[in-house]
Amino acid sequence: MTTMRWTGVLAIVLLAACAGSSSGGSDLSGWDPGVGPGLDNGGTDTPAQGPTVAVTLAGQPLGDAVTASIDAAGGTLASADGRLTVTVPANAVGDATTFSIQPVGTLVPGTIGIGYQLEPSGVTFAQPVTLTYAVPEAGVSRTGVEGLGVVLREDASGHWNWLADQVRDATGKTVSATTTHFCETSIIEGVQLRPLVATVPLGSTQSLEIAYCVQEETADGQLAGLVYNCDAGLAPLDPVRDWSVNGVTGGNGTVGTIQGSTSSLTGTYTAPGTQPNPSVVLAGVWLGAKGRRGDTFVASNLSVGTPGTYQGKVTVTATGLFAYTASGNLTVTPGKLLNGQLDDGIDMTLFDVTGSIKISDAITYSGFPCTADSPSQAVKNTSLNLKKVPLSVLWGLGIQWDLTCDINGTPTKTAAILTWLTGCMPNTVDQNFIPIADPKDIKGSYTRGGANCPQAAGLAATVEWDFLMQ
């Protein structure tokens, strides 16, 4: 069980929506984005029993949008990273229309990589538009092409839906589907082997479980299946065969061994006594033919050994009521549970953050010069939560520098307080996670008082960090 910790912060729901396909605003109040409302429950907000539906806030932008003007003749548009191609057929729109693709940090469970906000929203196309994802890692690092699917987030409810007409090309490693309206989109693993990533100490075992992130498809309608929070056992069990490690059925003494039933959802990996080279192994299983998941390989990336330690620099630049710069070198070490085991769960790894941050000599309070009583302050009781899917991080700091300021010749005591958490508060816990690209390089930035957090404008500060695995 993974523990999530942060310092002195209570995250609550922030109403937000992807503008677009449905009329009316989004009302997610009272819904936990990590749980979501139940299935058909008579229109009430009372969750139904059973698997939890994926309901999230809209993903935050990660870069500029790519745009193109497309008219009744049709056309195509590709994302800046080449991962998503939008194909607009003839007569989908009547007049020249601006289409755009913007990368966003999507929050849908089971996502592979980032998501995309598509425009124009609020428009129903006369002909279905095709979304085609290129997924070169399919079947290599985790789920095979047959287990993937294109999903769309509905703005009015925040629900994620699995599109009906999925077309998969295992050779070309592409997945496509059509839609008649735009919102946020991503590609997800409809079936997974969980945990997707984990660290297994030498000679230890790791339980593995097949999990489904979508309900069974229906034949009618574009939005064929709701996306779930990847609960195990959502669908009838597909035939299971060939549990393997690095392609070796059953594994071996070098890469570790694996045992799993052909009639259940679970298996067990046992790490070798000495660390393999490379230290990350691929534990997987094949699911037999059954529609969209026919002959699908699903796998978990397991690091044999212990989670790495990170080191790096944090820099704070404050403006507004207090103006100063501060920086320091921090160490990020694997967290431990009360029983001494590493806090490395199915979905998240917890790290402890230690070190100190020193404030600069040039400090002002409302323009008056100040000096810090103790310029260097230790980082205490601070944790960093590294989410595995989607790869993202949540952490924050709470530090106070006691100051003596010269206000018109009178020494005056005050304090510069730096309290922040990735994302903008009030917010949901999920929304406070910010995407990262490389688990070996945890870097990012946060601006309190910026465009996404205007309520803190009087205490504006930008925090930047870069932690490299040692």
Image (cartoon, helix red, strand yellow):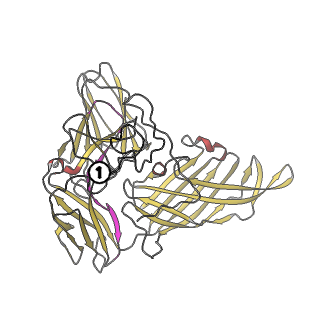
Residue positioned 24% across, 21% down in the render: 91
Give the x, y percent position of residue 79.
33, 39
Residue positioned 24% across, 26% down in the render: 127
Residue furthest out toward the left: 289
Q: Quadrant of residue 347?
A: bottom left
Residue 105, compared with residue 303, is above or below; it is above
Residue positioned 40% across, 28% down in the render: 23
Residue furthest out toward the front: 42
Give the x, y percent position of residue 209.
27, 62
Residue 29, compared with residue 446, is above or below; it is above
The C terminus appears in which quarter of the rendering? bottom left
Q: Is residue 181 magenta?
A: yes
Q: Nearer the viewer, residue 340 or 363?
A: 340
Q: Nearer the viewer, residue 157 or 173?
A: 157
The N terminus appears in which quarter of the rendering? bottom left
Q: Quadrant of residue 37?
A: top left
Chief secondary structure of the magenta portion: strand
Give the x, y percent position of residue 89.
23, 27
Residue positioned 70% across, 50% down in the render: 322
Q: Quadrant of residue 273?
A: bottom left
Side of 167 relative to 6 (left or right): left
Q: Is residue 149 magenta?
A: no
Q: Nearer the viewer, residue 409 or 258?
A: 258
Tag 1 secondary structure: loop
Side of 260 relative to 30 (left or right): left
Q: Which residues are magenta?
A: 179-201
Side of 159 relative to 72 (left or right): right
* Residue placed under numbered mark 1 in the picture: 213
Give the x, y percent position of residue 5.
51, 61
User: What's under tag 1, amino acid-wise?
Assistant: Cys
Determine crowd level at label 1: few under 14, some 14-19, many 20+ residues with C-alpha closer than 10 A: many
